[in-house]
Image (cartoon, rainbow, N blue to C red):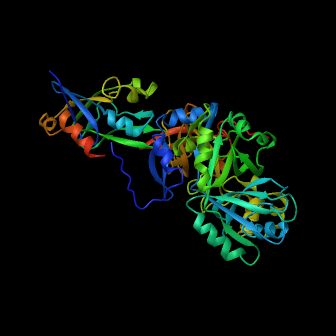
Amino acid sequence: MSATESTETLKRTPLYDLHLEMGAKMVPFAGYEMPVQYPMGILTEHQHTRSGAGLFDVSHMGQIKLRGESYAQVAAALERLCPADFLGLAPGQQRYSFFTNNAGGILDDLMVTRAGNGDDRDYLIMVVNAAGKEQDLSHLQANLNNRCEVEPMFDRALLALQGPRAGAVMEKIAPESVTMKFMTGRPLNVGGTECFVTRSGYTGEDGFEISVAHDQVDNVARKLLGDMEVKPIGLGARDSLRLEAGLCLYGNDITETTTPVEASLVWAIQKRRREQGGFPGAGIVQRQLAEGATRKRVGILPEGKAPARAHTEIANEHGEVVGEVTSGGFGPTIGGPVAMGYVRSDLAAIGTKLQLMVRGKALPAKVAAMPFVPHRYHR
Amino acid sequence: MSEVRYSQEHEWVKLEGDTATIGITHYAQEQLGDVVFVDLPEVGKKVEKGKELATVESVKAASEVYAPLSGEVVEVNSTLSETPATVNEDALGAGWFAKLKVSDKSQFGSLMDEAAYKKYVEGLH
């Protein structure tokens, strides 16, 4: 047995004390001291999020506002850096996207919401990964500052309430939340506190992400946790939940060297952008859209019980190395190992037999459809 | 007559004659969290003290279990493949990993006794 983690100067979210109070086990993650699990344990936390409602502190993530003279100006500015259609966003609508580089690789992935009063003064609010937030901010400032205002909101905390009971729980303290559909956002009073709420998440379940000022987040979190149906959930279960939902983890499943086509994220590049391009690396992405990429991100189900972790080599039936696992572990809802990774495109069809090289043994596996656990969004 | 001793890597060893039963400690299972898979060695495998004996996987990660003594694997706890959570529920009993025919019993004496291990774990906090 061996496991050690060094603690350098780590930042804390405003809920640090609450995590300790709830008995969290804290670990370093993306420069923050974050709860990996609470006394309930990762398996139970995972199951609770699939059956009830779980509360996650994701305040380490970065929130950035883009504001300009008109909504069209702001949307057009962000389209220079991301391949999503922001001009076509309806008021209150949210969209998943990513920053690309000149090689078509992914610099970070993000959620973008059109906020405001539904007129031409609307603006965009984005949520980016914790590890990339400073770089993302510099990237936006360097490339968009003369086109729109780039406003970091790093004094905003973020909570995620996820699970089939999330809607019922929110309704009790924020009655207006009932009208919200998946991938929309709006300002919302949550138990007496003004928040900006989107109906989205990273678990495959229905749920909300609640953006709130640092000095108010403790109130909102305690109010939600006061509901018998809500339990605190750590980063451990967050990872197993998103893996079962087939969702990418930046740094593992998508990186600067993976394109959206290779990453099977073409659905996040809307038609107009596929045709017109106009984002970094568009030429490469358009060529891959037309001709196909040489590798593809796929879901993988190992046949036995041994989990195949990130960096596990993937071989074809003849033992030839054809790719690598980028995320893998035990899926509590599946009750067995699940993984995703990149394979040669000719081996990406569902049902293709593969071998996973785990501790020197070749374990049989198959390409499988994702999500492994069906999404249950509130559409 | 049997005695239980402990390694710095949080394995326990119960020696009966020249057969050593090996598992991980209560502290180790707590640190790991929910165990979801145990990769056990083959019977007949010769292992050296301090080298990998088995792998235990929690939801989070895979961790190596090292052989606290040198010897030959004579039996493994195959029930763990069906119910790996036994490691969490009864680490010091039904959650044992493997039995070794020990090649050098003097290695046992260099492991910690219960009082020393308890002190060692307290020192880790």
- Give the quadrant of the N terminus of chain A: top left
Q: What is the x, y in percent for residue B79?
A: 40, 23
* A229 to the left or right of B90: right
In this rendering, the count of numbered labels is: 0
Query: Outermost residue, right direction?
Result: A119
Q: Residue at x 79, y 44 (%)?
A: A180
Question: Could you say where residue A361 lies in the image, as x and y percent from the top left?
Answer: 44, 41
Q: Is residue A333 visible to us here?
A: no
Foreground residue among A71 and A291: A71
**Which quarter of the rendering shows the C terminus of chain A?**
top right
Q: Residue furthest front?
A: A192
Q: Which of A113 and A374 is in front in this view?
A: A113
Tell me the quarter of the picture where residue A111 sits.
bottom right
Q: Is residue A128 left or right of residue A360?
A: right
Which sits in the foreground, A253 or A25?
A: A25
- Seen at 74% across and 37% down, the residue is A171
Nearest to the observer: residue B14 or residue A208: A208
Residue B24: percent from left, percent from top: 31, 34
Q: Is residue A220 left or right of residue A236?
A: right
Residue B7, given in percent of the width and then of the height, sits at 23, 39
Instruction: From this view, report whether residue A350 is shown above or below residue A267.
Output: above
Residue A104 shows in the view: yes
Vertical relation: B13 (above or below) A59: above
Residue that extends furthest to the bottom in the rendered view of this protein: A146
Q: Residue at x 45, y 34 (%)?
A: B34
